[in-house]
Image (cartoon, grey):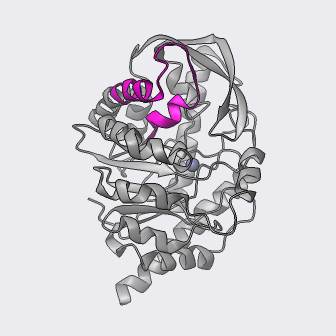
Amino acid sequence: MMKTLLPTSTAGSLPKPLWLAQPETLWSPWKLEGEELNHGKQDALRLSLQEQQHAGIVIVSDGEQTRQHFVTTFIENLNGVDFEKRETVRIRNRYDASVPTVVGPVSRQKSVFVEDAKFLRQQTTQPIKWALPGPMTMIDTLYDDHYKSREKLAWEFAKILNEEAKELEAAGVDIIQFDEPAFNVFFEEVNAWGIACLERAIEGLKCETVVHICYGYGIKANTDWKKTLGSEWRQYEEVFPKLQQSNIDIISLECHNSHVPMELLELIRGKKVMVGAIDVANHRIETPEEVANTLRKALQYVDADKLYPCTNCGMAPLPREVATGKLNALAAGAEIVRKELLVA
Ligand SMILES: [Zn+2]
């Protein structure tokens, strides 16, 4: 589908302008409300798109300017979840958070992101990617007082996500991504039903689909967790064999500066891979040559026509000039390797 070799994209979020939300703050509340907020989000989306275009990013997104949180903003639009009734749960076995409670059957009240996606579609003829939370990551962000079964709740969310995804596809989205950091933690459940739920979420879609599996934003809870993982991060090994067999088209991974052994990519040979070549947990801007090096290593295990250079995760918490520098480095690094491939 992609005409460009090594089509670049970002894993998701980009910094928000300071008039919309507090900079360098993850999940910052909006600074505007009502109609002003709607305009503010649209202007921020235009700005974020322009920064991606200036850098030369091939597959563009809204930079997640339209959401406050990558999971909660979606759940806020569902029936069956009480945001007033909160319980403290452990997120991905890593940190405690006060979360809303599932109090009844879950369903979608209306489209959540479809109007935003239509707006992005109007702004560009480039391929666009839209991110949704994955079912397993959604259940991990809630206290379930109704289904009392992680699997049942995930299955219900998969059906809801499928409705939303079909509308996004109809709105002209080329690639729909499901963020599943939980796939890096709950291996038994991923293999037992997590991947099956994801396949339910993409049922009947004709556009391309991605699952994004990372080690999280560069926040303290995540960097502390990473310190406990040892010198080789082999988490992907647990879920790759089953993902390789799944209907998901693209797998988005953290690779640069991580301790993930690159040879694990051999386990998903045949899939398209969004290779994270930008570290989001670090303010240092990569050189294009560093990006190129990570891509060259990945090329040992990923066929060139299936390699999509990307960031490790979202860049929302970074200062804007750092995120812009990293976007430029990603595009320039991909261009170096593109030229090498065309000569060879
Ligand atoms: Zn991520």
Residue occupying the point 49% across, 43% down: 180
Left or right position of 175 against 236: left
Q: Looking at the image, which residue sits at the far bottom?
A: 344
Left or right position of 200 against 11: left
What stretch of residues is rendered in magenta? Answer: 131-159
Residue closest to the eye, 188 or 114 = 188
Q: Position of residue 72 (x, y in %)?
A: 57, 26
Residue closest to the eye, 191 or 139 = 191
Q: Quadrant of the N terminus?
A: bottom left
Residue 155 included in the magenta stretch of the image? yes
Q: Is residue 320 above or below residue 307?
A: above
Asked which quadrant contains residue 190, the reply is: top left
Residue 320 included in the magenta stretch of the image? no
Residue occupying the point 66% across, 40% down: 93
Q: Position of residue 229 (x, y in %)?
A: 68, 59
Q: Position of residue 178 (x, y in %)?
A: 44, 42
Q: Quadrant of the C terminus?
A: bottom left
Question: Can residue 6 be seen in the rendering of this structure?
Answer: no
Q: Is residue 141 above or below residue 63?
A: above
Residue closest to the eye, 75 or 1 = 75
Number of marks present in the image shown: 0
Residue closest to the eye, 256 or 174 = 256
Q: Position of residue 21 (x, y in %)?
A: 71, 32
Asked which quadrant contains residue 85, the reply is: top right
Asked which quadrant contains residue 141, the reply is: top right
